Image (cartoon, rainbow, N blue to C red):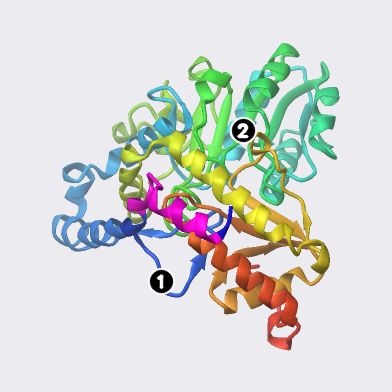
Amino acid sequence: MTRINAAHSDQTDPLRHFRERFDLPDGVVYLDGNSLGALPKTVKARVARTISDEWGEQLIRSWNTAGWVHLPQKVGGKIARLIGAQEGTVVSADSTSINLFKVLSAALSLNPGRTGIVSERENFPTDLYIAQGVAKQIGQGHQLALAEKPADIPAMLTDDVAVLMLTHVNYRTGYRHDMTAITKAAHDRGILVIWDLAHSAGAMAIDLAGADADFAIGCGYKYLNGGPGAPAFLYVNPRHHGGFRQPLSGWFGHRAPFAFEPSYAPSGGIEHYLCGTPSVLGMVAMDEALTLWDEVDMDALRAKSVALCDFFIQEVEGFADEFGLTLVTPRNPEQRGSQVSYSCENGYAIMQALIARGVIGDFRAPDIIRFGFTPLYLSFAEVAEAVAILREILTTRAWDAPEYKVRGAVT
C-alpha cells in the first residue's frame, strides 16, 4: 500500500465517521489506544450531568433515580455483547488485578486435588504477581509454572494442573492465542481456563461462550475508551455460578445487600463477584463510552485493524534492518492483536523523540517500542505520517538527545 492508496483507504473506510465522535488533539498521531483509549465526546457531558444533576441535585436519591446501584450489571451487559458472553455473565467492577484474584481463587477451589497453575513468562506481570499471591495465600502446595513460548503450553497441560491462565493478546508482542483451541485442549485434561482480555476487548470480536471459556477478565480503559483507571470487568461461565464463594465477600455480592444481614449469603448469579460500592463517576464514564459500540460492525473493525497493522509493517520494513528494528509481532493476522512492536537498541529514547514530534506510542522494557492501532479513530494517512516521522528520527539520530533518555515513572 502506498500513501496514495492510504488516502483512498481513508475515503472508503466504513468506520471513518467514528473519528468525529472522539476528542483528539490537533497535531497528534495517537498510537497508544491499546494503553489508554481516546475520550469519546459524549462522555464529558454525561459525567458533568452526573456531577451537577445526579450528585449535586438528587444527592443520595440518585442511587435509585439515576440507577447508580445497577451500573455494574448495566455496564457488564454492554461489554458482554463485545466479548461473546451470555446474558447475565459479565459485571463491571474493581480492577483487572482484583478481578483476577477473585476468579483465580474460584477456579482453584473448583478444581481440588490439583495444584498447578500454568501461564506464560511473557504474561502481563500483574497477572503473574496475583497468581503468586493467591498460591501463597492458599498454602496448599499450589505452584505457578511459566511457559517460555506459546508452543510450550500444550506439553505443560498435565493431570496435576488446575488452571491455565493466559492473556488473549500479549501486551508486549501482540501475539494472539487461539482461544477456542487452547481452551478445548485444557478442558480435555480437566483444566479450567482464565482469559485476560485486556488487549483484545474492543479490538476484535471475541466469542467466550463459543470457546466455552470458564472465566475472563479485562480492563475498560484501553480499546473500550472508558477513561484512565476505568472499571474493569469479569466473566464467569454460567456453569460456575454459585459454585464457589469468591473470597472478597463484600456487601454488593450479597443476595440482599440492603437487608443488612450480619452473615454473608452470596448472590447466586454473576453479582456474587461484586464486592464493594462501585465508583459511580468512573462507572458512568464507562457506561457512556460504551454506547457507540452498538453501531460498530465488529467484522469491519477487525478488517481495518488488520489493514492498519499490515500497512505499518510494510512501510517500516523498508528501513527496519538499516536501523536495527526487529519485528516481534506476528505477521500473520490470525496470530496478531491490534498492535505492532519492534525490539531495538535505544528504544526508550526513540519513543520519546516520537512523542515529542506528536506520534504517541509507548515503550515496554527491556527494548520494545509499541504501536497500538485503534480502528475507530485512526486513519491510514496518520499511519503513513507516523512512519515518515519514525524514519526521519532514525535517520537524523534525533533521538540521541539527553532529554529523550530521562526515564519517566510511566513508560
Q: Which residue is mark 1?
A: 25
Secondary structure beneath disc 1? loop
Classify residue 123 by image quadrant.
top right
Q: Which residue is mark 2?
A: 195
Magenta stretch secondary structure, dominant: helix
The crowd level at tag 1 (other Cα within 10 Å; few <14, some 14-19, many 20+) is few
Viewer-side residue, 31 vs 268: 31
- Residue 130 drawn at (x, y percent): 68, 44
Could you say which disc has been placed on residue 133 in the image? none
Decide whether residue 390 is among the magenta residues.
Answer: no
Query: Which three-letter amino acid code belongs to the residue tagged 2?
Result: Trp
Q: Which residues are magenta?
A: 3-18
| Quarter of the image with the C terminus in it | bottom right
Report the residue at 30% width, 44% height from top: 291
- 312 to 345, vertically: above or below: above
Secondary structure beneath disc 2? strand
